[in-house]
Image: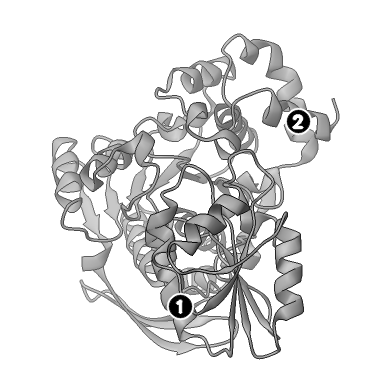
Amino acid sequence: MNYKQVLNYLYNQLPMFTRIGASAYKKDLKNTLALCEIIGNPHTSFKTIHVAGTNGKGSTSHMLASVLQEAGYKVGLYTSPHLRDFRERIKINGNMIAEQDVIDFVEQYQSAFEKIAPSFFEWTVALAFNHFALNKVDVAVIETGLGGRLDSTNIINPELSIITNIGWDHTDMLGNTLPEIAIEKAGIIKPNKPVVIGEFHAETYPVFEKIASEKNAKLYSAFKEVELTLIEKKQEENCFYIKYANGSLEDIVCTDLLGNYQSNNIKTVLTALRVLQLLKYNISTDDIKNGLQHVKSNTGLLGRWQVLQRIPLVVADTGHNSNGIAYIVEQIAEQKFKNLHFVLGMVKDKDCNKVLKLLPKNAVYYFTNANIPRALSAIELASFASEHGLLGNVYPSVADAIKAALTKAEKDDMIFIGGSTYIVAEAV
């Protein structure tokens, strides 16, 4: 098979959550354990850091990887979903896995794996762990796909677990209350291994305290450990004054990730780095500053308050649930523009009304849908949106919607593109 044929095999012959949704979610780790047994349990040959959470886990994972790279470590990074290229999911020091490596892995293990009938995600996790082991990474930052307890990545025994936050997402699979969702995410906490909790929520924090205590896992709370104050916003970076609660560091850090919501993720990352230092990782203050300042160039992160052009201002962001959209709406309100144009698409299995009620009514909407089966049709989305006073036209593709917005926007207007990771994937 060539690379295109291999991707078609992975995408089309096996269940893929990003395309079909909940029916692709497998509620146990048996398949992943069986696959990794076949390939020699590669995940046991390198150190790992495990990252879960409703929002921010992708940014947090990339920031950590960037700092560890600056510190001289050979760093694996496994994240999902991808935006432009499947290979974004599996990187070493910012370099995507080679197409030939994907081909070789699938051809080598196809017949053995088919007896297990793994999902797309299970295939990809096995591929990532194998790639990291073959290339002898020092440490791999592993982002969960969905949840934590039953996520395919949860066969690792990490040196550190991180839970960024808990919000409303995937309730059909993870639970209908925040504590229920927290229990699923807390499934990545391992016995006698430290865990960092990013954000405080009165309903979920006691869940983490209880599970960490039961597992004798030392719990670090980022919201207690680090104070962060925004001191300067530049066109290409934001700068913060940081102060650790224990007085070990006071300094200024800048990051090339522009979203206001990144402040919470930076607290989480700084706390995690402090724990890694306690675990004898050789990470200096300069490594931290350089890593945070060059996340995008070090790791290739896309789609987080990504400025696509300045005149008119065009921004794309992958925030897609009510918590993520709330942050985005706040940041849009801070921008200076004459008129707001909003290219919007969503997926069928989200609570779209929860999101739509948060969106600004004083915008012109361009309703569309990504080119995946899971996408909510633009016509349905426009109908739901009209019930919330959000008005606009329907476009058959993301490209058509963006083209229409660019045609109508004046130079001092703003165009925002989002509502779904898959809308952003077709935009960037």
Q: Considering only vertical position in the picture, is 426 above or below 241? A: above
SS class, disc 1: helix
Q: Considering only vertical position in the picture, is 149 above or below 354? A: above
Three-letter code for the amino acid on which mark 1 is drawn: Gln
Q: Percent position (x, y) of residue 28?
A: 40, 22
Which image quadrant for residue 26?
top left
Q: Percent position (x, y) of residue 258?
A: 52, 75
Q: Considering only vertical position in the picture, is 39 above or below 16? A: above
Q: Is residue 190 visible?
A: yes
Other-residue count near label 1 (Cα within 10 Å), few / some / many at <14 / 14–19 / ≥20: some
Q: Percent position (x, y) of residue 211?
A: 18, 39
Q: Which residue is mark 2?
A: 8
Three-letter code for the amino acid on which mark 2 is drawn: Asn
Question: Going 74% across and 33% down the picture, which residue do you hit?
Answer: 7
Q: Residue lying furthest top in this view?
A: 115
In what quadrant of the picture does the N terminus appear?
top right
The residue closer to the viewer here, 267 or 140, is 267
Give the label on residue 425, or none. Answer: none
SS class, disc 2: helix
The residue closer to the viewer here, 422 or 212, is 422
Other-residue count near label 2 (Cα within 10 Å), few / some / many at <14 / 14–19 / ≥20: few
Q: Percent position (x, y) of residue 223?
A: 25, 66
Which image quadrant for residue 229?
bottom left
The residue closer to the viewer here, 142 or 250, is 142
Which image quadrant for residue 242?
bottom left
Question: Going 65% across and 60% down the picture, which residue do you hit?
Answer: 300
Question: Going 31% across and 77% down the picture, which residue do you hit?
Answer: 249
User: In screen coordinates, is 268 left or right of 423?
Assistant: left
Q: Do residues under tags 1 and 2 come within 8 Å of each other at their CB atoms? A: no
Q: CA distance from mark 1 to mark 2?
A: 38 Å
Q: Which residue is mark 1?
A: 331
Q: Considering only vertical position in the picture, is 358 above or below 250? A: above
